[in-house]
Image: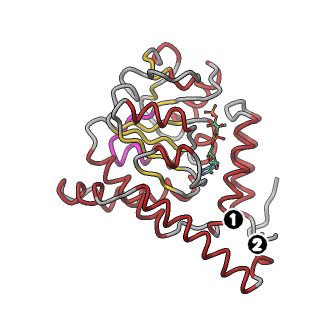
């Protein structure tokens, strides 16, 4: 589908096209298309931009990843479709392993997603086939099967577009969990150690940029950034931001601007 460069919703339409392509190629599940629609709805409320509390969370997340002994980035179908190059680049910048981990797991999808990551520059991709032989305790979805050298052993795990159950289970294992979730009210958002309320298509490139900036920082400075972050306070700031933005739009009648 050709989307004119001047189209006001170009970026959003391009993201949809990438997901539809991933769906046609078999690595995005239909449920992933529905999940994206829910995300788009929250993105409207944010004004489709990285808001200040999200940037603060991205900074804390990058500091935590750079400080980690064994950081791992979990990749599902939507992430592979939306930000394949950027997620590989982020892993490289923070020296993290990449692991495929799927809610709707099939061997074909695992392999297809690993292939997409390799095509975009990844070296080793964990979590495929028999590599996913460790189990996250108390988790009953297919997400429980993880790589013993990856998520199972990780101290810090980045989980974009996650479900609440795994976030809670990983926290119970003592791990620092970083979530990227446009819904600030979700169970994932509340259960994670650091929640980035931003679209993955903006959050991941922003984290790459921050990683390049912070790579030269001392461990003390990184520890200060990571430990001064308070997830509950940050989520309250996100909700306050949305509330005041909606009030402002209602006052100005500006809601019409967003009905394209
Ligand atoms: O590829 P699989 O098999 O692992 O399945 C992936 C999906 C996304 C289908 C699976 O993880 C799922 O069902 O997720 P949920 O429980 O629907 O949660 C997805 C969350 O991500 C929701 O809170 C959405 O608001 C949010 N979300 C959707 N699109 C984006 C997003 N957050 C950030 N950026 C997005 N582009």
Q: Quadrant of residue 3?
A: bottom right
Q: Quadrant of residue 34?
A: top right
Report crowding for label 2: few under 14, some 14 to 19, many 20 or more residues within 10 A (C-alpha): few
Residue 56 to residue 34: above or below: below
Residue name at image x 41 percent, y 64 percent: 56
**SS state under label 1:** helix
Residue at disc 1, CB closer than 8 Å to ligand 1: no
Report crowding for label 1: few under 14, some 14 to 19, many 20 or more residues within 10 A (C-alpha): some
Residue 187 to residue 233: above or below: above
| Marker disc for residue 44 | 1
Residue 18 to residue 247: above or below: above
Q: Quadrant of the C terminus?
A: bottom right
Query: Percent position (x, y) of residue 168?
Result: 47, 35
| Marker disc for residue 258 | 2
Query: Looking at the image, in which quadrant does ligand 1 appear?
Result: top right
| Range of residues picked out in magenta | 90-98
């Amino acid at each position: 589908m050709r989307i004119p460069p001047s189209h006001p919703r170009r970026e959003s339409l391009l993201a949809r096209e990438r997901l539809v392509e991933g769906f046609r190629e078999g690595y995005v599940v239909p449920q992933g298309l529905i999940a994206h629609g829910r995300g788009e709805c929250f993105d409207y409320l944010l004004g489709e931009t990285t808001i200040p509390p999200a940037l603060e969370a991205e900074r804390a997340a990058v500091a935590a990843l750079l400080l980690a002994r064994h950081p791992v980035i979990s990749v599902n179908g939507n992430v592979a479709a939306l930000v394949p190059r950027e997620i590989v680049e982020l892993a490289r910048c923070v020296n993290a392993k990449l692991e495929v981990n799927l809610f709707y797991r099939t061997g074909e999808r695992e392999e297809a997603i690993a292939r997409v990551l390799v095509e975009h520059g990844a070296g080793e991709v964990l979590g495929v086939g028999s590599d996913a032989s460790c189990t996250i305790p108390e988790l009953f979805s297919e997400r429980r099967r993880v790589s013993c050298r990856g998520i199972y052993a990780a101290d810090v795990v980045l989980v974009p577009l996650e479900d609440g159950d795994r976030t809670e289970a990983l926290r119970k294992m003592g791990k620092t969990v970083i979530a990227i979730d446009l819904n600030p009210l979700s169970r994932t958002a509340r259960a994670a150690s650091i929640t980035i309320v931003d679209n993955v298509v903006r959050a991941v490139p922003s984290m790459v940029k921050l990683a390049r900036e912070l790579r030269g920082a001392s461990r003390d400075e990184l520890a200060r950034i990571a430990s001064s972050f308070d997830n509950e306070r940050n989520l309250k700031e996100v909700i306050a931001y949305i509330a005041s933005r909606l009030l402002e739009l209602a006052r100005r009648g500006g809601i019409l601007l967003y009905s394209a």
